[in-house]
Amino acid sequence: MSREHPARIKSSVMDSMVWFIGLVVFLFPQGAPVKAAAAPKRILALYWYNKDFPSNAPFDQSLQAVLKSAPAGSIEYYTEYLESDRFPGENQSKALRDYLRQKYASRFIDVVVAVSDVPLDFLLKYRDSLFTKTPIVFIAIKRPATNETSGPGLTGIVLGGGYKKTLDLALRLHTGTKQVFIISGTLNHDKTYETLCQEELQGLDSGISINYFTDLSVDELIFKTKHLPERSVVLYIWEQSQNEGRLLESADILAAIAPSTTAPIYGVANWQVGRGVVGGYLRTFEADGTRVGEIALRIANGARAQNIPIESATKAPIFDWGQLHRWGLKESALPPGSVVLNRQTTVWESIKWYILGATSLLCLQALIIGALMWQRAGRKKAETEMVLSNNRLRESEERFRLVANTAPVLIWMSGPDKLRSYCNQPWLEFTGRPIEAELGNGWAKGVHSEDLRGCMDTYTNAFDRRESFKMQYRLRRSDGEYRWVFDIGVPRFDLHGSFVGYIGSCNDVTEHKRAEEALASLSGRLIDAQEEERKRIARELHDDYNQRLAMLALDLENLAENIGDSSVDAAHQLLESYERVSELGADLHSLSHRLHSSTLESLGLVAGVKAFCKEFEEQQGIQVDFAHENVPHDIPEDAALCIFRIAQEGLRNIKRHSGADRAEVRLEGLEETLHLSVTDPGRGFDVNKRSPQNGIGIRSMKERLRNLGGHLEVRSRQMAGTRIDAWLPFNAASRLAS
C-alpha cells in the first residue's frame, strides 16, 4: 500500500471539515432571522422667517409635541428657514431649491409642512423638481389656487378670515364708532390682505366708513394713527416695510404706532397681544402648531392628503389687560370664555396677601392666647368637677354594692373584654367560692358541662352584637347540686355612649323547671292516653257497632224486597229506614276514621294524610291540594301520628274559621326533620291581637310538637289567609317518646 504525505492528509481533513461546517450552517442557520426595523417617517417643516421670529417658536414647540407622541424612533423631524425677507430674489429662491434638493437627495421626506404662504408658494413653484412625491401640509393666509386631487396631494389650515367677527366685537365694545381703519401691507405690495378684508367686510354696517392704510411707510403710519378722527377703531393685520435699507417686521411696526395712536387697535393673532392691540378673535400659533402636527402625523401613518379636508384656523377671544384699561373697557363686557393676558397687579394686589397674612397671624395669636386662658379656667373647673364626680361615683358604687349585696338575686358585671369583673354577695354564697375564683372566666367552672358550650356561645355572641340576652343553664351550688338558673344580661354604656360591659342577674328556677317538666310529662301522657282511648273507641265502633248496623241494613233491605207489592207504603218506609241506617253506618265509619286512621297505621304517613285530605274534600266541599316530597317510609309511629293530627286540626280550623274554598297541604322531609304546612287564602286574623294560645286546636298542636321536640309557627293577616308550619325532628321525637 502506498503511504500519502502527512501534510496532504492534513489538508484533505481540513477541507472536509470546512465543507461539513459550511453545510451545517447552510442547513441549520443559527437563530431565527431578525425582522428589519421599520424605517422612520421623515417630516420637514419649511418656515418663512428665521427661527427667532415670534410666531415660529410656539408653533414649532406645539408641532414637535404632537410628533413626540408617536412611538420612539418612528418620526424624524427636520426644519428649514427660507428667510426670503432677508434674501429676496429669484436667484436666491433657485439657490435654496438646489440646496434642499441636494441636502435631502438621500433621505426621502414623507411629509413637508409649509408654515405660511411664502413657503407654500415656494414648494408649489418647484413642485416638479423638489419633493415631487411628498404630500404638503400647509398653514397659510389664503387657500392655494391649485387642488391636487391626484399625486401626493396637499391639505392644511387657512388662517385668513375672521376679520368681520373681530370688527363686530370692536364695534360692540366701542358704541358709536363711525370709521374703521385697516392696516396691512407686504414687501411685494400685492395688497393680499386688503383684498381678503374687502371680500369679508362686504356685509358690514353701511353706516361705518372703512379705510385702508396699505403699504404705507412707518412714518406715514405713525402720523396718520396720531391724527385719527374720534369714534374710530383700527384693525391691524400685517405690515412690512423697508426703512433706509433696514427691514421692519410687522411686530416692529405695530410697536411703533401703538403708543401714540388715538384709537384702539384690534388684531388677528395672539403674538400681537402685548405689542399694542386690545385683542379680538385671534388665532394662536400653539393651537395651529398642534393641529398641523396632528394632520402631518396622520399622513405619515398612511392617510392620503386628498382625503383630509382643508380647515379654517380656530380663533379665540384674547385680550390685553393694559389696553383694556387704556381704553376704559370692562372685562364683564367681553365675550364668554375670553382670555385676558398681561394682567398687572396694583399696589394693594401686590401687598394684600402680606397684610392679610400678618392680620391673620395677629388674630391667630389672639385666639391662641384666649383659648389658653379659657382652657386654663376650664381645666380648673374640670378638676373641681372631677373631684366632685369621683366622690359622687364612689358614693354611687357604695350604694350599688349595698343594694346588690342585699338583693335576693345573683348579680354579676363584666367589662368590655367579656371577663367577669363583679359578683354580688348572694352569688358568692350560692357558689360557695371567693370573689377571686369567680372573676375573669372563673365563674364558668361552675356551669354544668352539658350546658357550658351553649351558655358561652350565647354570652359571647350577645357581647359581639351589644345585645341583651336571656338563657338558662345549670350552675353548681355550694352543696354540689346543680341548680337551674335563669340569666338575663344587658349591655352597659357610659354617658358618652361608649360600651363599658354587661350587667346581669340570675334567679334559681329549678323548682319551676321541675314543675314544667312534670306538666309536660303529664300533658304527654294525657295525649298518649287520649290516642289510646281514640284507638279503642275507633276499633269498637268499627268492629262492633258498625258491623251490627251493617247487618241491620242488610236485613232491612231483604225485608223490603220480600214485602213486594203488598204494601207500597211499608216498602217505602223500609227503604227509608235502610238509607238512614246506611247513612248512620257511614257516619260511624267516618267518626272511627277521625278517631284513629287505619290507613295511617297500615300504609304510613303520606298515604294517611292523603286519604284524609281526599275524605275532607268530599265531605266538606273544600278543595285540598296535597303534595309531598322526600318523606321517608320508616317514620316512627308517634311522629307520624303527631303530624297526622296537626294536618287534621289544621283543615278543621279552615272549615270552622277561614271561609276559604280551597286549601293546600304540603309534607316534606328535610334530612331528619318533617315539615308540614297547611295554607288557606281565607279571611285570616291579626296574630298580634288574637294570640294563637287562645285556640284549643292550635294549643293542642303546639303541645303535641313540644312533647316530641318540635315547634309550630302560625302566620296570618286579615283578609290575606293563614299558614301553619310544623317542624318535627322525628329521630329526636322517637327518643323523647321512648
Image: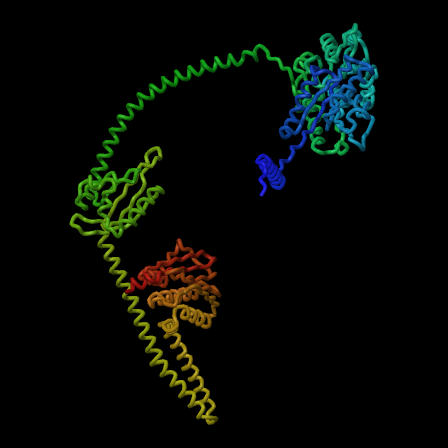
Q: Residue 119 in the image: state x and y as whole percent.
A: 77, 21
Picture layout, residue 277 above or below residue 708: above
Q: In this image, 362 relative to 330: left or right? A: left
Q: Residue at x 37, y 80 (%)?
A: 546
From the viewer's side, name the closer residue of 272 and 12: 12
Q: Residue at x 34, y 43 (%)?
A: 467
Quarter of the view holding residue 338: top right
Q: Residue 615 in the image: state x and y as whole percent.
A: 44, 72
Q: In this image, 492 relative to 110: left or right? A: left
Which image quarter holds the N terminus? top right
Q: In this image, 293 relative to 671: left or right? A: right
Which image quarter holds the C terminus? bottom left
Q: Residue 712 in the image: state x and y as whole percent.
A: 37, 59
From the viewer's side, name the closer residue of 714 and 101: 101
Quarter of the view holding residue 266: top right
Q: Residue furthest bottom?
A: 566
Picture layout, residue 543 above or below residue 477: below
Q: Is residue 722 visible?
A: yes
Q: Residue 730 in the image: state x and y as whole percent.
A: 35, 62
Q: Residue furthest front?
A: 1
From the viewer's side, name the closer residue of 181 and 257: 257
